[in-house]
Every structure is written in C-alpha cells, then in structure tokens.
Image (cartoon, rainbow, N blue to C red):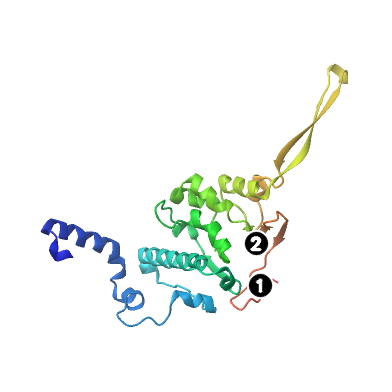
Amino acid sequence: FLSAQAAEQKEGLVGTLKVMLGFFTHPDIAEIFCSDEPNTIDIQDVDKGRVFCTAMPQTFQTERRYINTYIKLLFYTHAMMRFDKPKSARKGENLLIALMDEFQALATASEDGISDHNVIDRLRAANCCLILGMQSDASLFPVLGKETAQVLTLNCRSRIAFRQPDPEGAEAVAQFIAKVEKKKVSKSSGFMGANSSKTVNKEWDYEVQPGELMKMPDATAWIVHPSKKKIKMRIPAMDGAGKIPDWWK
C-alpha cells in the first residue's frame, strides 16, 4: 500500500504512524504489548475471573497513558460485545469490574468513537462496574469539558466522597447527595420591639453544605448509595492484606 503512494504521501503516512505508534517502540514496551510471540493472555479471560493490572516505571509517563487508555477501550469493547449474545446466554455472566485510579488521566471524549460518558450507562446494563478515582469532579473539566464531565459523573450512582479540595467539586458532591426542604425563619421588629413579626418560609437547600465537605477530617467520607441512602463514617487505613495497621489503632 505504501509503495503505491507518491513520495510525499508516503512520508506523510509514515510520519503519522510514527507519531501514533512511536510510544510502543521502546524495547521494554514492545516486549509486552507488541511482541511477535503468540499472546499468553486475552481480554476475554476477564470472563473467567482473570485480573489485569498494569504497572509501569515513572520513566514511561506518556507510554503509560497511551497503553492504559488502549486497555480501557479494549475492556469497554469486550463488555459491550455481551449485547451480541442471546439474553439467555448473558444470565450467567460474571460481574466485570474496572478500577481506574487518577481517572482524569485516562478520560476520553470522542463523539465519533468510544467515550466514557456515552457508554457508561450501557456498561452498567452489561453487568460491568466502573470504579473511578479522582481528586474531585472538577479534575475532569479540563479534559472533557464541564458539561461532558457532568454527564459522566451523574452516571456514577454510588459515591465515596472524602474531603473536597475545591469549591466546584464540593458543590458537585453536595448536589449529588441531594437537597432537602428547610424552614427559614425571619424576624423583624420596630422601635423598642414594637410591631414584631415572624415569617416562616420553606426553601430547598443542600443537606450537606459544600463548606462542610471541604472541612472534613482525614480518612472521613460520605458514602452515598444509588437509593440516596448515605452515611458519614471514618474509613480506617489498611495494608495490602486488608489488615488495619497498628499505628491506626
């Protein structure tokens, strides 16, 4: 195909391919993700309970983003392919879980392809769960834009919210927790207390104020269920074996 193009076109195509695939050419990366050897694992193995975990040195900052995004989209595609099966064959399928920390570095928004905000609801219907860790809702705004980010976060129906680092994130969490009807009492009086009056108005206000969310102590979080049942609790630190360390006690 390349030999049939004019020299200028060929140079352009090769240059584009180098830009797109250059991050996979490092020998350490190619050995795992671009090897000529037969694959030892397949994304379909997640249906059998296999756990995929990527760990890359800090020297591969850009490569990490490309590869993790590719694996994420591959996982999405595999989960969506469950809809191609008969309904009877889907009853016994296991729950697929994707745990992505610092998700703002992996978020993608492409109207012509697979984007997080336009597949998250269908992934839920495919018996797939996404656990997305971010500093705050506002972390997604520079990547996806505010409106697109809100579509994504509103589809995350369960939430564990620790102390919020910024007002925008705190307000988003307060709005997610819900508003309640509160009574607001206003009193007024004339000179020396004469002609006093009291007015009671009902208005909707945040059940948990954004300011409270920005002042919560360490290791304390609001846990909100999709039913809007919620609890504020202190979550202890745990080691890799799930044990609470002595320093916490």
Quadrant in the picture for the N terminus: bottom left
Q: Residue 52 at x, y = what percent?
A: 48, 75
Disc 2 marks which amino acid?
Ala
Whether residue 134 appears in this view of the structure is no
Which residue occupies the foreground of this view, 124 or 131?
Answer: 124
Give the answer, above or below, for where 182 lies relative to 61: above
Which residue occupies the foreground of this view, 204 or 84?
Answer: 84
Which residue occupies the foreground of this view, 10 or 241?
Answer: 10
Residue at x-position 36% and y-position 68%:
60
Disc 1 marks which amino acid?
Trp
> Taking 9 as reference, is 124 left or right?
right
Q: Residue 71 at x, y = what percent?
A: 43, 68
> In what element is the residue under mark 2?
loop
Q: Which residue is mark 2?
A: 219
Label number found at residue 13:
none
The image quadrant of residue 227 is: bottom right
Among numbered discs 2 and 1, the one appearing first in the sequence: 2
Give the answer, above or below, for where 61 lies relative to 185: below
Give the answer, above or below, for where 21 lies relative to 239: above
Q: Which residue is mark 1?
A: 247
Residue at x-position 32% and y-position 82%:
37
> Dot 2: few (<14), some (14–19), or many (≥20) neighbours within 10 Å?
few
Mark 2 against mark 1, which lies toward the viewer? 2
